[in-house]
Amino acid sequence: MAATKDSRPCSIADALAVVGEKYSLLVLREVCLGNGRFDQLVRNIGAPRDILSTRLRRLVEAGILTKRLYSERPQRFEYRPTQAGLELEPVLMTLKEWGDRHLRKGVDLPMVVEHSCGEELVPVVTCRACGDPVRHEDLTARPQTPGWTVTGPSAA
């Protein structure tokens, strides 16, 4: 995807163009929980039906979800995550952890997710090379797009 004219070329912006619309990540949350039928999505998300239909169509077009017919009369569909959709699940878990910690302050959590080891999941982003947790002070951005520096476009 191309970034907006004059804005920094950015994979975060590109990803948000696909999953950043209101309700899109909540759709993915529900589908990853196994609630892929339209009536389940409406009930669990609370999105207006027309908006939800638009989000589902866009997520299918983007390759995040698949759509499968489960009833012919009336015609009804179920949505499931693709591999690309499943790769966003750790992002959802990290957002959940952030919300639990900073918005709910660890009190009255609406859901706990357990890892297969039996313990509550607390996601931690680590460096693939060294295994250390990622911390802001350990990061160095290196723009790869010609004409761009960390501070913005370079002088022409």
Image (tube, grey):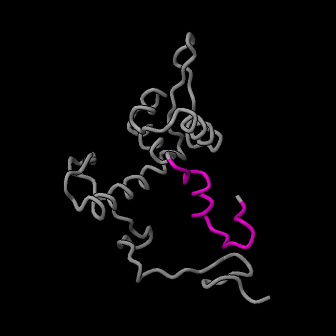
- Where is residue 145, by image quadrant? bottom right
Q: Quadrant of the C terminus?
A: bottom right
Residue that protrudes farthest toward the right in the picture: 156
Q: Answer above or below: position of 8 versus 28.
A: below
Q: Nearer the viewer, residue 81 or 48?
A: 48
Q: Answer above or below: position of 138 versus 98.
A: below
Q: Residue at 58% across / 16% down in the picture?
A: 75
Q: Nearer the viewer, residue 47 or 126?
A: 47
Q: Quadrant of the N terminus?
A: bottom right
- Where residue 70 sits in the image (x, y, percent)? 52, 18
Residue 9 belongs to the span the image colors magenta = yes
Give the magenta part as a residue range.
2-22
- Where residue 103 sits in the image (x, y, percent)? 30, 61
Q: Residue at 28% across / 58% down in the picture?
A: 100
Q: Residue at 41% across / 54% down in the picture?
A: 90
- Where is residue 96, by image quadrant? bottom left
Residue 90 belongs to the span the image colors magenta = no
Q: Answer above or below: position of 153 versus 35.
A: below
Residue that protrudes farthest toward the front in the picture: 48
